[in-house]
Amino acid sequence: MKTKIHVIAHTHWDYEWYFTSSESFIQLCYHVDEVIKALEDGVLDYYMLDGQMSIVEDYLEVHPDKQQTLQSLIAAGKLKVGPWYTQSDQMIIRGESLVRNLQLGIESGDALGGADRLGYIPDAFGQSIDMPKIFSQFAIDKAVFWRGLSSDQLNTREFYWQSEDGSNLLTYNIKDGYFVGVQLIEVDYAKPLLEQIKQNTTSSHIALPVGGDQRYVDFNLKERIAHYNEQLTDDHFIESNYDHLFAAMENEARTLPTVQGELLNAEVSKIHRSIYSSRYDHKYLNDKIERRLIFQIEPLMSLADQLGIPYKQALIDKIWKLTLRNHAHDSAGGCNSDKTNQAILQRFIEADQLSYSVVDYLTRKISESRKNVKNNQVTIFNTLPIIREQVITIALSLPVTSFSIYHGEQKLDYDIRNITKHSNAPIRKTIDPAPASYYYEIEIALPVKLQPLGYEVLDIVLEEDRLETVPASEKQEVTPNTIENEYYQVQVKNGSVHVLDKESNTLYPDFLLVEDAGDDGDNYDYSQPENDWKLQFKFDTASVSSNPGTWKSTLKLNGNFVVPKNQHEREQGTATALIPYTCTIGLEAHKQAVDIHLKINNQAMDHRMRLLINGGVNTEESIADTPFGTISRPVTDPNFKHWQEKGWKEEPTGIYPMLSFVQLHDQQKSVTAFTKGIKEYEIIGSKEKDIALTLFRAVGYLGKPDLKRRPGVASGNQFKYIETPDSQLLKSLTFKVSIRIGRTCHEACAFADYQKYAISIPYYQQQSLNQFTNTLKYFVMQPLPFQVPETYSLVDATNVKQVVFSSCKKARQSKGMILRFFNPTNQALEDGGELTCKENVRFWQFTTMEEKLDKSNQKSSQTIHLGSFKPKEVKTIYIEFK
Ligand SMILES: [Zn+2]
């Protein structure tokens, strides 16, 4: 077959890695200068700037005078930029983050002459099942990627990459890597390269990306192409770009195969299917910030906008950009040098402080601007568009410890969980505070029912202190070391945690275990050491205390795990490192879940700790959530047996990523583990299966060669051992897990349970006793020049059916609001239910993730019928209020 080889000049610009972004920024500045010169002088026809706008933004920050130049090169189609803001990871990053990444990338690319509408993923460690439908919603119908597709899935490079909703991308798999074309520059013979890149192609148009990590501009590209063409008669090399390649491919009358599902196999390249637990501390922070941005800040600012406090898009973008830089594939993976990881951590800290301060500011501003604001009232915010009926835990600052709580006319029962006494007098060394300066900080648990997307007020009526403020635990009849609610009884007996599922009368003995094992891996991957010593811990050395109540009950286990200090001790069979822990197990009334809060102080190196959840489920598949849906995965990878013979780059262990939950089902049982920050699981056990959640991995090198699970050269830098002592994580670590066991828990219900568990409920108490409930409480705040309603609710999506709420925010380019829902299952849904708007609607319409509006199909009803959903379909609604 006579072929045309499309030579595509590009650079792959890792935002940071074993170097920091500051270090590579200097090279970037000179690199882009070279790119501009090459394009302006006609030395190159086209150049691809790695599909990400963050580096263009960085360049323009110090070269504002080059804006016009870039704009004309981009508009002329010579310089290709976008559509991403950063080259994001897809496996442990939330769907809405991927959407923000593309929104910001496309917006800034379009402002600069036009973002490239190509789903370009040169280096991410695997492709999510949901990428085709995400790209499709941004009018992107072509994709190029490198890693993850194996020959048992498909043996050709060109195909349609499809999502279950029918979204389709014409896709080219650059199987030999984005750097394969460097041979054109550095090797004089055309034949071997030609043979390599022609393998498994079905088209007479072949991609040859010429570029590499932080690689300079190849000014001699045209000469090299001419040199290669001299050697060939049939085949022909041309300077090209992906637009031309795909246009040529589309002109060929061929039927291409279709591929669905995630692409996570290590045949053509490493995929790092255990990177999801590297630098757990970063994963935890990322999860917290993503949740806050998506489920609190954007909805809170949307409702504030309706109340007259304008939505600050640029402020939200600032926090998003800090976070999205940390989503670049290496950054998110944690496979970086220590100094780079420190820079990443710094960005997380900044994003964390900015984001919680937005919540603090807006909740206070709204609370203090209500019509009839009274002292001690607590304003509670529901940032989800569904009614929330659950137990919440809040802290009150009051002058007395006896009080009643009213929600409207209704008096609420509550548990006192904890009381501490404080003084608000100035601190002095020798003078005791005056008695009048004392107040109490009282932690209470109480049931609330909150209207959707809005706020409500609790009245606190003070009573004369009866000095009868015994904690709930002492009021109740207490069985030692046992707590229960209507669903479960949890008992700690001889150090074992037993859970009784009351509904099915099933006892789960040793429900929770902690596993400690060696880790000979690196910042990329877990790898079992040659001489491993695996330990399993119950909580048998723990002291147990309980704090039971009507609404919330907890058991607290304090103890130490004794583990080998390092790999040397593990080989010797000695264990001298003490890892102190506090494990709090909680139950709440009316909630079908056991909440686990584990805090440890890691004092050992070269090891992996996992939480084993003894579900005993008879199944061969697990279900985990993905950016916009769920995925079913086999417990044992079908390629596990023969990976070495097939020459795979890594052992396909059944270690998998998750965003928020993983679940197992059989005919009788269902176990779901929800997490806040844990992103990795493996299903273990022979017949009856259990869930192993990787808590963290402690390793000392960025990349190591010749691992048991990953033979061959080192990942990262192949020529140097780069020590990463910080990645031993010798510090305090917190793990939050909630486990639901029972009969069934279908996908939509799992997402709803997750949101109830993981999205906290912001509140603000009107009081002046305690000036330190948040950082800026000490300072006075100006109420709004106008009053806001006593209570508020904007949109009610309680009546959506079997679909998952995904986002509520202001539209980026229009004045209305965006709401997004998706069908998490593989089945079509006849009716996704409806939502009701509580403010007067001017019009609403369906739109896409890109939020483009057209005048057709606008409706003006107060009730919005979501209609039918295709399997896994995502629907976005635009609502403009009067
Ligand atoms: Zn990369």
Image: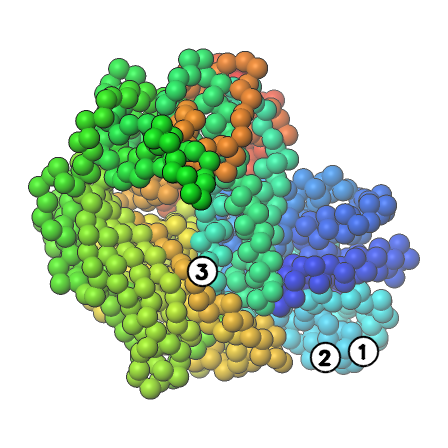
Quarter holding residue 558:
bottom left
Identify which residue, 92 or 478, lies in the foreground: 478
Q: Are marks 3 and 2 in contact (CB under 8 Å)?
A: no
User: In the displayed image of the protein, which residue is found farthest to the front?
Assistant: 430
SS class of the residue under badge 2? helix
Q: Earlier in the sequence, mark 1 or mark 3?
A: 1
What's the CA distance linking mark 1 and mark 3? 52 Å
Q: Is residue 295 left or right of residue 116?
A: left
Quarter holding residue 553:
top left
Q: Give the residue drawn at x 43%, y 63%.
A: 731
Q: In what quadrant of the picture does the N terminus appear?
A: bottom right
Which residue has dot 3 on it?
A: 280
Percent of width and height locating residue 459:
32, 20
Q: Earlier in the sequence, mark 3 or mark 2?
A: 2
Q: Amino acid at mark 1?
A: Gln
Q: Are marks 1 and 2 in contact (CB under 8 Å)?
A: yes
